Amino acid sequence: MISVSEAIRLIKKHAIHSNSGEVPLLDALGCVAAESILALTDTPPFDNSAMDGYAFSYEHWDKTSPLKIVGEIQAGTKSDYTLKTQEASRIFTGAPVPEGADTVVMQEKTDRKENLLIITDPNIQANLNIRPQGSQTKQGDLALSKDQLITPATISYLAGMGLDKIKVYKKPTVGIILTGKELIKPGQTLEKGKIYESNGIGLQAALRNLHIETASILTVDDKEEELVNAIKKMMYFDILILTGGVSVGEYDLVPAALEQCGVKKVFHKIKQKPGKPIYFGVHSKGIVFGLPGNPAAVMSSFYYYIQTAIGLFMKRDLVKKIELPLDKEYTKRPGLTYFLNGKTTQTGVEILSSQLSYMLNSFAVADCLVELEEDKEFFEKGTLVDVLKFI
C-alpha cells in the first residue's frame, strides 16, 4: 500500500494531457483557452444609449427652451439624420446615438408635450447615459489571455465580439464500466439479493458538473471473459473508470482483467479510508482507475484522484484545498488517511455522521471532504485540517 501523497504523485507523473483544438463557443464551457484572443471589433461597435430616453446635444442646448423632437431610434435600427441645435430624438436602450447628439436624458426626467421636450433633470451633464464605441474593448486589444478558464460569462463576452469558435485544451473522453451481478437500474422492481446501481449515475453527474459528458457506460457481470471483452471495447477512452471488483475476493477480477488487456499497473491500494483498494494503471491510449464498489468510496475517489487527472488533462486546477478549523474533536484510526464528508460552517468545518463507505446520506448534503492525516489519531476542536471543497 502507498500513501495518499504518493498516489497523487504517481497520478501526476503518468497523467495524459489534452491536445488543443477549435470548438464551438458553447462547447468550450469549462475548458481552458489554448491561445490568446484579440478583439475583432470595437465593443460596443458604435456609441449607443444606456437608457430609454431622449438624445440631444448638450453643447448646443440653451438650457431653458424646450427641445423639438424630430425622430425615434430603436435598438437594431440606425439613424440616418443629424440632430440640429435644440433638437432631440426619442431613443431606446442599445440604440445608436444619432449624429449631432452627445447626451441622453432618461425619459423619467423629462416632460413631453406632443413634439416638444422639457428636461426636468437638474443634474443633467454632457455625455450622460451614452456607452462610447470601444469603451469595453477596442479592435486589436487583448480580449482573453491564454490559459484563461472559459466560464458562462466568458462565452457571452466572446460572443458579443462576434466569435463563434475558440481554441481550447479539449476535455477528456471518459468511459465507465460497472461490475457486479447484483446491480439493477433504478426504476425496476427490487428483487431479493439485488441493489439499485448508483455509482454510474453518480459518476456521470460528477463529470457533467465539470461539463464532461460520459461517452459510454457498460454494466458487466463478475465474469472474467465478459469483463475482459468490456475493457477491450473501452480502451480507446482517455480515462476509463471501473467500479467494483478491485479488492481481493474471489470475484474481484478487475486487476487481472486489466493486465490481460495490456494495462500496466502503477499502484493498487492506498492507505486511506474509504476506498483503500483503488487501482491506477496506464496503457498506450490512456489511463485507468479501478474503484471499490461502495458508493461513498467511489465519490470520494472521484473528487480526489480522478478530478486530479482530469484537471491535468485540461490544464485546470480542479482539486483546491483550504485549511479550516474543526468544529468538534474527532478520533480516528492511525495509519490511514481519512476522507470524511463535511459541511463548512461560519466557524470552520463540521464532520458529518454516517461515514461508512456504503452510506451516501451524509455525502448527499456535504459540501466538502475533510482530509485527516495518516499518522494522527486525535484531532482537537479547532485543529486546522485540509478541506477539499466541491466544485
Image (cartoon, helix red, strand yellow):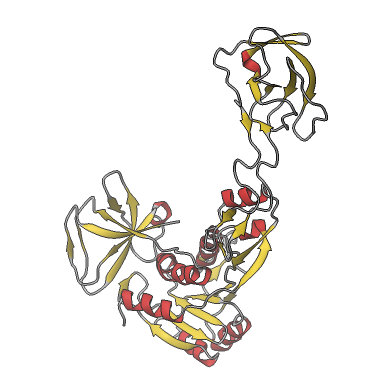
In the image, taking residue 368 as reference, residue 211 lies left or right, namely right
Residue visible at 64% across and 69% down in the picture: 21
Residue visible at 61% across and 10% down in the picture: 120
In the image, taking residue 198 as reference, residue 326 lies left or right, namely left
Q: Give the vertical position of 153 relative to 118 (above or below).
A: below
- Relative to the observer, which residue lies in front, 2 or 47? 47
Residue visible at 69% across and 7% down in the picture: 65
In the image, taking residue 86 as reference, residue 314 lies left or right, namely left
Residue 96 placed where, x, y %?
Answer: 73, 32
Quarter of the image for the N terminus: give it: bottom left
Question: Picture quarter containing residue 132?
Answer: top right
- Relative to the observer, which residue lies in front, 293 or 346? 346
Residue 124 placed where, x, y %?
Answer: 58, 18
- Relative to the observer, which residue lies in front, 337 or 133? 133
Residue 379 visible at all: yes
Question: Picture quarter containing residue 238?
Answer: bottom right
Quarter of the image for the C terminus: give it: bottom left
Residue 168 placed where, x, y %?
Answer: 60, 65
